[in-house]
Amino acid sequence: MISPHVSFTEATKSNAAIRHGIDNTPNAEQLKSMRYVAVEVFEKVREHFGKAIDVNSFFRHPDVNAVIGGSKSSQHCLGEAMDIDGDRTGVDNAEIFEFIKANILFDQLIWEFGDEEKPAWVHVSRKEEGNRRQVLMAYRDSSGSTKYKQM
């Protein structure tokens, strides 16, 4: 277990890794970061809402990140970021976003796609030191490229 409500399997699952035959196992340093994020962010969110929250993406081996076209500086590769989604269990992603923004120390908090009312999911990262509290919105421009704007 990474934390009381995040299993190792859930934290390392990757369809891209399976399709491309990539081992998506974190090293000791990445695992330490994952445990820190899970306890200091995810568990607090789950406790506040009192319902299961899905982990869409957590750890990504750099090779997995490359095949999905992720950012070269993605904190997922360090075990410092996770994408979470409450839709399946009836927890509003906008409420998750606002709760984290107001109550939890984070490095980056990203309203991922969706619309102005609700993100499709919430990206949150946290480091042990030097958290920037950067709040962004991810969207696609007219060419389909992912762009970010400050919120």
Image (spheres, grey):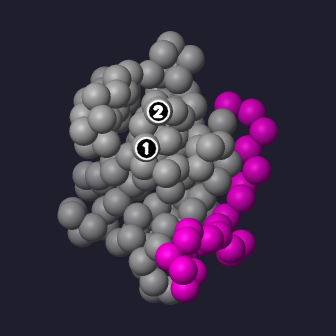
For residue 58, side relative to residue 107 (left or right): left
Of residues 50 and 66, the one nearer the viewer is: 66
Look at label 2 and name its amino acid.
Answer: Asp
Q: CA distance from mark 2 to mark 1?
A: 6 Å
Residues in magenta? Answer: 128-151
Mark 2 lies on residue:
63
Q: Position of residue 133 (x, y in %)?
A: 72, 55
For the C terminus, give its image quadrant.
Answer: bottom right
Identity of the residue drawn at 33% across and 48% down: 55
Mark 1 lies on residue:
67
**Is 145 one of the magenta-colored residues?**
yes
Identity of the residue drawn at 59% across and 49% down: 71
- The crowd level at tag 2 (other Cα within 10 Å; few <14, some 14-19, many 20+) is some
Look at label 1 and name its amino acid.
Answer: Val
For residue 33, side relative to residue 45 (left or right): right
**Is 3 one of the magenta-colored residues?**
no
Q: Position of residue 26 (x, y in %)?
A: 44, 22
Residue 13 in view (yes/no)? no
- Mark 1 secondary-structure assignment: helix
